[in-house]
Image (cartoon, rainbow, N blue to C red):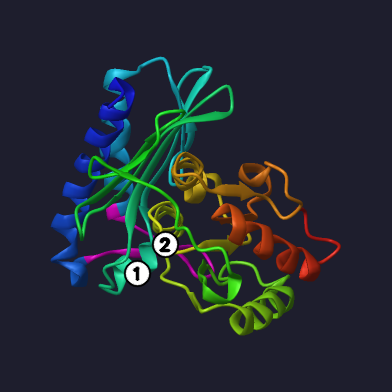
Amino acid sequence: MHATLNIAVKAARRAATVINRASTQLDLLTVQSKSPNDFVTEVDRAAEQAIIEVLRDAFPGHGILAEESGESGPESEFTWIIDPLDGTTNFIHGLPQYAVSIAQTKNGVLEHAVVYDPNTNEMFTASRGAGAFLNDRRIRVSRRTRLNEALIGTGFPFRQFDHVDAYLAMFKELTQKTAGIRRPGAASLDLAYVAAGRFDGFWEMGLSPWDMAAGVLLIQEAGGLVSDLSGEANYLTTGNLVAGTPKIFGQLLPIIQAWRPANLQA
């Protein structure tokens, strides 16, 4: 494992210690609303601080983009993109589907990725050009080629509902043309599941960079494809993402594109 990735794994485990401790005392949580249906707890902030401390200790010259604290650190070609607790709403409700997501970019290109599920102790990791792994075992996207046999992950609109009708049209068509659609509630894990062959594809609109950065590299290194809604690579900017095995991606993207509103950035 690359030395930089080792540090990211250490940071993810440190955050998980904070999360696991709090998960046994959910009734004591203080929950705040950043915006409608977008929640944050003191656990998000403490887990984020734990990650940042590990990364700053090892890489004091690197920049950081984190969900709760935003941008910090010096100007650098290296940036760490952090979601300390992806799936906060699940966590608040005691639903064990949430993860720590950490990615590093070099001049905007994804280099290293960690998605850690503290409930199952599943550590998904990837480094550019070195493959994707689950607990040190190499993973690949599934071999499914037919959309009607594919299990597709997604995320429902929950913050902004400007394009909810378009999303529902995509959902309606895909629920009839696939083997099933799942919405577990943590995008980083959904993307990790595509990389591991559990899902055959995924789409969502309105994501933030920290929701998807690590998961995107996992899929790419596992042999999958990722794009924005126009088939380009601007997903970290637009927040709109389509991913899958090469064959499923090719069938999924045109259906998403057919229902994309004209006023929605790709």
Q: Which residue is mark 1?
A: 90
Residue type marked 1: Asn
**Front-most of residues 141 and 163:** 141
Query: What residue is drawn where x is 45% and y is 53%?
Result: 141
Residue 118 rendering spot, x and y as whole percentages: 22, 55
Name the residue beneath numbered marker 2: 186
> Which x, y percent locates residue 103?
43, 36
Residue kind at label 2, given as amino acid type: Ala
User: Residue at the location (59% across, 52% down)?
Assistant: 246
Label 1 packing within 10 angstroms: few (<14), some (14-19), many (20+): some
150, above or below 57, in the image: below
In the image, residue 141 above or below residue 93: above
User: Residues at badges 1 and 2 in contact (C-beta under 8 Å)?
Assistant: yes
The label nearer to you, 1 versus 2, is 2
Residue 194 vertical position relative to residue 237 in the rendered view, above or below: below
For label 1, the SS is helix
On screen, 13 above or below 150? above
Q: Quadrant of residue 107?
A: top right
Name the spot of residue 78 as percent of width and height, x first: 48, 21
Q: What range of the chain is rendered magenta?
A: 29-43
